[in-house]
Amino acid sequence: MNRPLITVPIGDPAGIGPEIVVKAMAVPEVVDTARVIVTGDSNILRQAVRICGRDLQIHIVDSPDQGDYRQGILNLIDLKNVDMDTFAFGQIQAMCGRAAYEYIEKSVQLAMDGQADAVATTCINKEALRAAKIPYIGHTEIFGALTGTKNPLTMFETNGMRIFFLTRHLSLRDMLDRITKDNIISCVEECTRALQRLGVTEGTMAIAGLNPHCGEHGLFGWEEVREIMPAVEELQKRGYRVAGPIGADSVFHQAAQGRYNSVLSLYHDQGHIAAKTLDFDRTISVTNGMPILRTSVDHGTAFDIAGTGTAGEVSLVEAILLAARYAPHFRNDL
């Protein structure tokens, strides 16, 4: 079987994206596992090759079928959208925000047209997008708009541990209002479909507790008694394989040991801390619920070290490998 074809946009040219792309493409396991098409700017990538000291030939193509997928070759669709006379590392530039958006747009187009099996994204800068008057705050919103997906679903995967999020970018006060039986039921149904789309059909999803010791039957809070446990019981009646609530101080460890196929984290930091403490560099974001598969690094543009060649490529390597692993099983009809 052919290696899955993964398209990788280089991200904001002023950040570390181009450097980690170059470094990742010099990793033999990446080339052995996937066929990679990069969307970016040839001048930026030639500069990154020099900075990183990698022995790579940049092969410019118009489409994936023109690629040369051997070791030592970086296949590039060159959008020629960076003016090197005004370009600067580590600075918010409208030109770079626009360029980053166009790289994503091209990669999404390739996946939507069936020319690529998945997209593995690098890092973009929200302020640069705003400077370029791009009407989206980040990757998830861009992918939602470009694929016609109303509510893309985020899943983290770290060394085989999968984490979903009931709530994400909310204050703790506002988050508490979202911990309801109906919201949990709806989210678990959506997460189950997401797992099925990735080919994960076995195992049990764990629901994390909210309060210390899951509230101790109301001693430390009533959310578990009034909302979470009733949601779990109703889901079980409907045939869903769920367990919980399970104390947040143990559930992620248990999932990492293989007891559960995934964990529903109730709020942003609950799941983020667990994943990134386990392995910060290998915490990969998977965006589901769309007609295409997307994985991503979970770090920023690191403007402070851009252009130095010191950025680590581990996260992008893992994002490409994860995309290649899920791509053969991915279904967009659920």
Image (cartoon, helix red, strand yellow):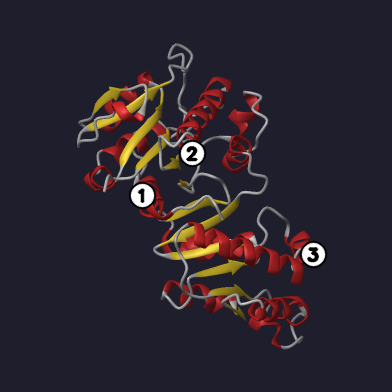
* Sooner in the amino-acid sequence: mark 1 or mark 3: 3
Number of marks in the image? 3
Residue 177: give its label: 3
State how far apart marks 1 and 3 are (Cα).
38 Å
Amino acid type at mark 1: Ala
Q: Which residue is mark 1?
A: 324
Looking at the picture, tell me which residue is in the foreground, 19 or 160.
160
* 39 versus 317 height, above or below: above
Residue 27 on image: x %, y %: 25, 43
Tell me the residue at 20%/33% (across/down).
72
* Sooner in the amino-acid sequence: mark 2 or mark 1: 2
Which quadrant of the figure contains the C terminus?
bottom right
Q: From where the camera sits, is residue 48 visible?
A: no
* 193 versus 252 height, above or below: above
Q: Which residue is mark 2?
A: 123
Q: Secondary structure at mark 3?
A: helix
Looking at the picture, tell me which residue is in the foreground, 99 or 142.
142
Camera-near label (1 vs 3) is 1
Residue 46 on image: x %, y %: 31, 23
* Sooner in the amino-acid sequence: mark 3 or mark 2: 2
Taking 225 as reference, is 25 left or right?
Answer: left
Q: Mark 1 touching mark 3, by CB under 8 A?
A: no
Residue 102 on image: x %, y %: 52, 26
